[in-house]
Image (cartoon, grey):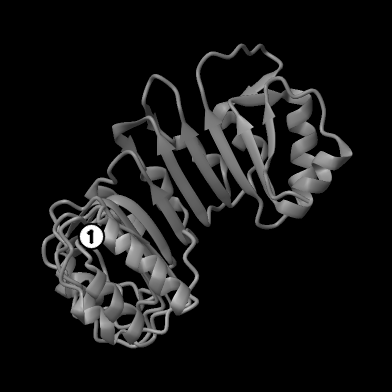
Amino acid sequence: MSSTPIRLNIKTKELSVSHISSIRQNKRISICNGVPKNIMAKLASIVSDIDGLNLLLVLEDDFYADENTILDFEILKFLPNIKNIQILSFRCKPLNNIEDLAYLNDIKLFGIAGNLGKKVDFSVLQKFNNLSALSIDNTILDEKYYGIINNKNITELSLRKLQLSSLDKNLNLQKLEILNELSNAEDMASKFPNIRKLSLTNCKKLLDFSFISNCLNLYDLYINSVPGLTAIPDIQFAKLHTLWLLNCKKLENIHLLYRLSTLKRLAITFAKITPEDLDNIFSALKLEHFYFMSENKASNKRFEELAEKYQCGTDDF
């Protein structure tokens, strides 16, 4: 059965047997704007005993609803035991408040993106002590809400901007994604000593990458569109399995890459990589998968030759 979530909206007429079966098996529901009251009542009964249910709440304009429709965050009154919720707002008016999350008893996973205001009030999240995964895109989490991410149960965090010096040490954080700006990067290892996956995208102010050398448990490192990256960091640990270096157009010094003996999956796109660099990569590393793309035709051709010679997977992963 497909893992695509069951999609409900104000025009939904019924919950069929196949819908109910899919909800129970895949534990995923998508609701756009709202649902009729009778459907909401039936849905609430169905999911009351489903642990780990994931709700995607989509907010859009241009819809008609009447007194028989349960709209927007009012849905949460009927689903108080939902613990995993993602919100996507595509409305013309920016979303500035999520206080109705207080209808929920507990939240473990929360994500929000779309047309959000510059000063969204996230204070309601402070009540959820079991929050373990937090993702906020298209707006910045103000430092006054950092008590939310200082929660020791947080294991996964995705933000546009993060000021590391304002955080407490968290031994449990495993995965960090920064989508725009990372400040005080040198504090990374001391704040998150057990981090295993680090993702940095579009961090234009980031120039010093030496902090990565101190992240001794990194398993997966993703760097995308970071213009300050000119050389592979001095990575001195022996756990790195996957490395992504995408669209870092000033990257050219890669000699430290050759000693990453545990590396199995590598992706490099649009860096200043020569055919000779590729020869060295393939001869030094035992890669299972290598995705490569360059503006240099000679490098692309040499990559194809080497990938065939070393029988290395080349699909985008």
Give the secondary structure at mark 1.
loop
Please name the residue shown 46% across and 30% down the image.
89
Q: Residues within 10 Å of mark 1 (few under 14, many from 20)?
A: many
Q: x and y percent of residue 54 in the render?
A: 62, 49
Q: Nearer the viewer, residue 207 or 34?
A: 207
Q: Is residue 226 left or right of residue 289?
A: left
Q: Residue lying furthest right in this view?
A: 17
Q: Which residue is mark 1?
A: 271
- Residue at 47 percent across and 65 percent down: it is 314
Q: Nearer the viewer, residue 286 or 185?
A: 286
Q: Is residue 193 visible?
A: no
At x 85% / y 41%, what residue is drawn?
18
Q: Answer with the quarter of the image where residue 206 lies.
A: bottom left
| Picture coordinates of residue 56, whole percent (x, y) | 58, 40
- Residues 130 and 59: in front is 59
Q: Position of residue 139 (x, y in %)?
A: 30, 39
